[in-house]
Image: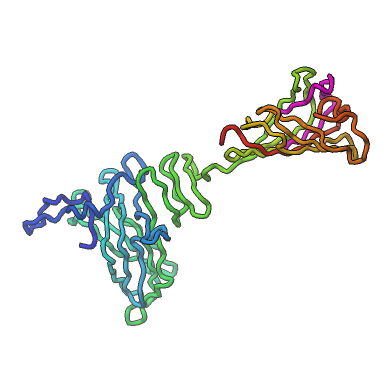
Amino acid sequence: MPIRSAWLLNRSDDDGTGTGTGQSRTDTRLAPLGAMTPTGRLTTRGGVLPGSPDGKYVLSGLYVYGQSAGMTATVASGRAVIHSSEAAGSYPVAVTEYTQLLVDDGDPANPRLDLVVLRVYDEAQDAGGRTEAALEIVRGTPAATPAAPAIPAASLALATIRVPAGASAGSGGIDWSSAVADLRRTTVAVGGILPEEWARDIPGAYPGQYRDTGAEGLQRWDGAAWQPYPALPRWRDWTPVWTTSTGLATPSFGNAALRCRYVQLGTVVHGSFDIVFGTTTRFGGGTSADNWRLSLPVTAASLSQAVGFAGLQASTRERVTARLRTTTTRTLELEISSGSVDTTPVLNSGLADAITPWTWGSGMRISGTFTYEAEVAL
């Protein structure tokens, strides 16, 4: 039997011939068993199990195609789970042989869309008189702009077939190169990653579910939408704490204009800052020993003599460069590393402070960028 199901008939069930025709050991081995992707307390995501013999394709099972002109469709072998209802549950099914289906001739006047389904009949649930799994074509309604018929209960849609008006074996049949629209979707074991598929608008089943979108990578369902995973790094605002190396002569920003941003990806931290001092900024006074410190947005893994550079500007032409270094894992300092671009001698050298490289005032600015290794990965 090319279409096998599990948990549909007991092996001992009698079909009237005196022999059991229910689930065999082979049926049990072939049909997909176990908890599949849940969609509710008692519901399961129906779909085709992914995989291909060479590993090149997401899906090879239950593929619908036509080999030549004519009215015969072929369905490849494969495995699937068909969900019926909360009361009936889900049915694991295996199609073990390539199966041919005959498409009805086309309507004389209009095209139609037929639907290929893998369907389960269960007398105990639907009182329909049949208990089996079957591959079927659900005939659509001819129309100038045809629509696919509704998916029957306890069925998994595999494809639509566009049947041209007047199509028949004698008239050349169906153009199989363009007539089939693939509707297969995947399902995997609970907790598994759903492979890429065509229907991207299908919501997740639970927060923490993952799916693979191919070139776009993994996505994680957050309870409302699919989000990139890992989460895309985002730039964040950060206000540095301004202190001194001695803890004395503490400065404060006052009405300074600050734009400080950083982003962390793994253990890598990138940041930038632009500080324009204002009329109420306090620079701390003190001596050249009270070196300024700016707190880092994220604790560094270690100390470094160079994590970036900054431009210090007193006027349009009075500008110097400073090397940024981490003197603790939580702070950086600015070491004057050039003369002024207008060749004016700087007042003091060394690490920036209230009087280095000049006596600071309103309107002056410090702008810099840095990159360093964080202590903890994000």
Q: Is residue 183 left or right of residue 235?
A: left
Quadrant where the N terminus sits is bottom left
Q: Is residue 172 left or right of residue 87?
A: right
Quadrant where the C terminus sits is top right
Where residue 87 sits: x, y (%)?
26, 43
> Total of numbered circles in the picture?
0
Q: Specify the farthest residue to the bottom.
A: 170
- The residue at 36%/63% (across/down) is 63
Q: Specify the farthest residue to the top.
A: 248
- The residue at 30%/56% (across/down) is 79
Comparing 128 with 217, the one in front is: 217
Taking the magenta stretch, the answer to whether it contains residue 287 is yes
- The residue at 48%/43% (across/down) is 220
Q: Is residue 140 left or right of residue 296?
A: left
Is 45 rendered above or below residue 62? above
* Magenta stretch: dominant secondary structure: loop
Taking the magenta stretch, the answer to whether it contains residue 332 is no
Where residue 290 sits: x, y (%)?
79, 22
Q: Quadrant of residue 78?
A: bottom left
Comparing 233 with 355, the one in front is: 355
Q: Quadrant of residue 166?
A: bottom left
Comparing 131 with 359, the one in front is: 359
Colour scheme employed for the rendering of this structure: rainbow
Q: Is residue 250 left or right of residue 5?
A: right
Where residue 113 sits: x, y (%)?
38, 66
Which residues fall within the magenta stretch? 272-294
Comparing 275 with 68, the one in front is: 275
Where residue 359 sits: x, y (%)?
88, 27
Is 120 rendered above or below residue 173? above
Q: Quadrant of residue 147?
A: bottom left
Is 272 rendered above or below residue 352? below
